[in-house]
Amino acid sequence: MRAVENALKITIPDNARIIRNLITGIQYVQDHVIHFYHLHALDWVDIVSALKADPKKTSALAQSISDWHNSSTAYFKGVKAKLKAFVDSGQIGPFTNAYWGHRAYKLPPEANLMAVAHYLEALDWQRDVIRIHATLGSKNPHAQTYLVGGMAVPIDPASQNALNADTIAFITGLAKKALAFVEKVYIPDLLAVASFYKEWAGYGAGVGNFLAYGVFEQDTKSNTDNLFFPRGAIYGKDLSTVHPVDHTKITEYVTHSWYDYSGGDDKGKHPWDGETKYNYTGPKPPYKYLGDGKKYSWIKSPRYEERPMEVGPLARMLVAYASGHKRVQEVVNFVLKKLDVPAAILFSTLGRTAARGVETLVTAEMLPVWLDELAANMKKGDYRIHANERWEPSTWPKEAQGYGWHEAPRGALGHWVKIRDGKIENYQIVVPSTWNGSPRDAKGQRGPYEEALIGTPVADPEQPLEILRTIHSFDPCMACAVHVVDPDGREVTRIKVV
């Protein structure tokens, strides 16, 4: 969408910009909360240990860190009874496929019970607040209302089938609910859990280079630099300098990926010239070995100025912090002070997890601001949501090319398009998990996942909980399973990803 708008020099209306910010914003808030409770928390929280908790002590703990309404002894007693029924039945549902009782778990039973309670609450909460996404995007996930040139969400104060004052009021109520849960549940839980795992500030640092395209446009220009979360690159963990970002400095390698490039696999290609030519040389059933050993991934290796780069909430918050973003600095400094740790912990598994929480809070605070902007435009009679100019292909140039930048919850997302005679000639996407999960490049440089695991202690290779902590901190896009192999390529174990 943005890539085509950039290619065709289309400027979207202000209402389209605001609606896009709202859709992305609530997606961030919901996605990050889901990630913490339902995808990452069980790396730190021992569910079975919660059965040993004293509900009265759990209540006291919860009330000591937040004034959230669900914090009575009776409430936690009910959660414990529900959990016991799960365990006694032998069918523990969402709590299947974890390493309960692992010696790397450190939370006391009461903290575990509190986390279980909020895990269950978050299921209901996210189902409710994401109605903002469904209202503005027609469905969740994968919003359907985006159009080249704007949005397909009509604004008409006189119509019940369009955005009107009632719709704005409805969304505002959900935005307040979203913020309340983040402030009173997510952030207190994050700090409480992190306080027991401070040693994880020493693991998972990764490549030390960070890339953010920036997000939440504050004007309607294509690929604008006027962004709420700024654009920039950081090299070697140096927060004193934020480098500008130029898309022409991005290349992708396939040296260790199951693809071929014309001209040789040791050369990087810019996405405009990118190729996707499959060449699978990996293991065959029964999948005991990696294959030829040279190529070992379906992921390409994106590089920025020939450097591997981490993308995602940590990258965004580091770039914002180093760029002088006042609110981000306030929240980051609050977290560091609360945990009594130095800023250096940000470059770690713990810091990556904390950054996601910081971003969630700051984004949730902005939802009402964008709603006010939309309401103000409606009040002055501005209902425009689409730029009609250049919509007809006959008006397009014979050849055009463009790129579009976005920050998905997982990180920097780029699309590049070449258009010839009104048709797409080449289209390439570089997604967040490609940046973070990339294999080695032609120089042998590891990608962020691989580098972040170096030096991680693993108590039990059959139950590699420590590996999952770091990999999950990136919020990887994994569709099925992860395989662990020994140096000779033999499969050691297979871990089901919850």
Image (cartoon, rainbow, N blue to C red):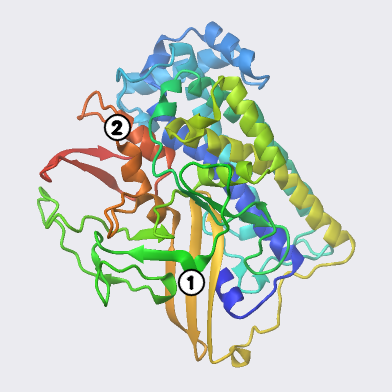
Element class at badge 2: loop
Q: Is residue 420 above or below residue 366?
A: below
Where does residue 311 sit, x and y in percent of width and height? 47, 50
Q: Is residue 476 above or below residue 225?
A: above
Element class at badge 1: strand
Quadrant in which the N terminus appears: bottom right
Image quarter for residue 38? top left
| Residue wearing tag 1 | 416
Residue at 42% from the left image edge and 79% from the top image edge: 426
Residue type indicated by callout 2: Gly
Position of 165 compared to 202: left or right? right
Residue at 45% from the left image edge and 16% from the top image edge: 81
| Residue wearing tag 2 | 455
Residue at 61% from the left image edge and 71% from the top image edge: 147
Quadrant in which the C terminus appears: top left
Residue type indicated by callout 1: Trp
Pointers 1 and 2 in contact (CB under 8 A)? no
